[in-house]
């Protein structure tokens, strides 16, 4: 299921879940991820920022990466409650989610803001996972492709490469709902984003991975992850349970 030479990435987004006892989940993932699988796919956990340091320590010496769920675009300053890319990198984070639909919806993030944050991630040497996705109304109006393409066109920094950018297609209505688009619909959006990336960002962009996110679970992972141009998954709820997350990773076994 490796496509175009792109190494699959299975990423977990814990959202606002987890306390210190949740480090056990990361430890279980570390202990039970088979060496064979770890050699073939990238595995990432994005816990709440309170747990990043502990999760980095718990995965030290393994291939499991730890990431943030959000960042401020600036390096430092009077931005109470915010965390910069440099701070995440300082903790040992390697990735950061940018423009998740929950932040777009509840924190009024715009595509321009996503662009600025993606630049911030790059500046600090982090890989930004830029999220795009349509609402149910937009899909029903037949606008899904236009919406995600417009989000990508503005959000993606010029000169993006696989080292600093991952794209995640997450239909808003599929997140935490148990509903997923049809395989055909997922493949259609991924093909469209792939085509756009290849044109927008040049040769280096061919290696940029496009993840699917939205109600991915062990029972549907194999089908979704085998679709053309799907290079991995951004997993919410199922990443909170080690067995479920590993079950999704096992789609690549
Ligand atoms: O970032 C992850 C997504 O929002 C998917 O969440 P979910 O797997 O709970 O639907």
Image (cartoon, rainbow, N blue to C red):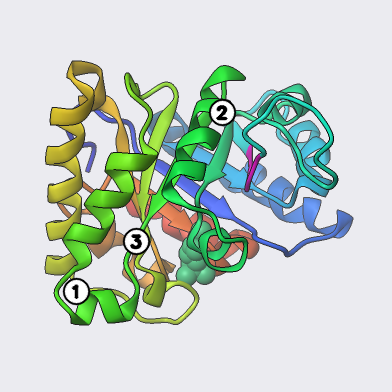
Left or right relative to 148: residue 120: right
Left or right relative to 111: residue 108: right
Query: Is the CB–ligand 1 distance for label 3 below 8 Å?
Result: no
Count neighbours of disc 3 (C-alpha within 10 A) and say few if under 14, some if 14 to 19, many if 20 or more: many
Q: Earlier in the sequence, mark 3 or mark 1?
A: 3
Figure check: 174 above or below 109:
below
Q: Mark 1 points at which residue?
A: 182
Figure check: 100 above or below 54:
below
Q: Mark 2 points at which residue?
A: 121
Q: Earlier in the sequence, mark 2 or mark 3?
A: 2
Q: Mark 3 points at which residue?
A: 133
Secondary structure beneath label 3: loop
**Alpha-carbon distance for marks 1 and 2?**
32 Å
**Alpha-carbon distance for marks 3 and 1?**
15 Å
The residue lying at 11 percent from left, 67 percent from top is: 184
Is residue 69 rendered magenta in the image?
yes
The residue lying at 59 percent from left, 35 percent from top is: 64
Across and down, in percent, residue 89 comes to 69, 24
Magenta-drawn segment: 67-71
């Amino acid at each position: 299921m490796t496509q175009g030479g792109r190494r699959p990435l299975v990423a977990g987004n814990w959202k606002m879940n987890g306390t210190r006892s949740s480090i056990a989940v990361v430890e279980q993932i570390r202990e039970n991820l088979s060496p064979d699988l770890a050699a073939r796919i990238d595995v990432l956990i994005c816990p709440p920022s309170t747990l990043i340091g502990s999760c980095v320590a718990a995965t030290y010496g393994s291939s499991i990466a730890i990431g943030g769920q959000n960042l401020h675009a600036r390096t430092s300053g009077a931005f109470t409650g915010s965390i910069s890319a440099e701070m995440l990198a300082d903790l040992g984070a390697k990735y950061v989610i940018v423009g998740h639909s929950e932040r777009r919806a509840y924190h009024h993030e715009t595509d321009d803001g996503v662009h600025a944050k993606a630049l911030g991630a790059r500046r600090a040497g982090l890989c930004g996972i830029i999220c795009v996705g349509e609402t149910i109304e937009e899909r029903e109006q037949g606008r899904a492709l236009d919406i995600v393409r417009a989000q990508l066109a503005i959000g993606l920094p010029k000169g993006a490469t696989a080292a600093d950018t991952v794209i995640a297609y997450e239909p808003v209505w599929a997140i935490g709902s148990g509903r997923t688009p049809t395989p055909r619909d997922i493949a259609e959006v991924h093909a469209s984003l792939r085509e756009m990336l290849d044109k927008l960002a040049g040769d280096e962009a061919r290696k940029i991975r496009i993840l699917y996110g939205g109600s991915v679970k062990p029972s549907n992972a194999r089908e979704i992850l085998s679709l053309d141009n799907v290079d991995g998954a951004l997993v919410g709820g199922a990443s909170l349970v080690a067995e479920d997350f590993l079950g999704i990773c096992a789609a690549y076994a």
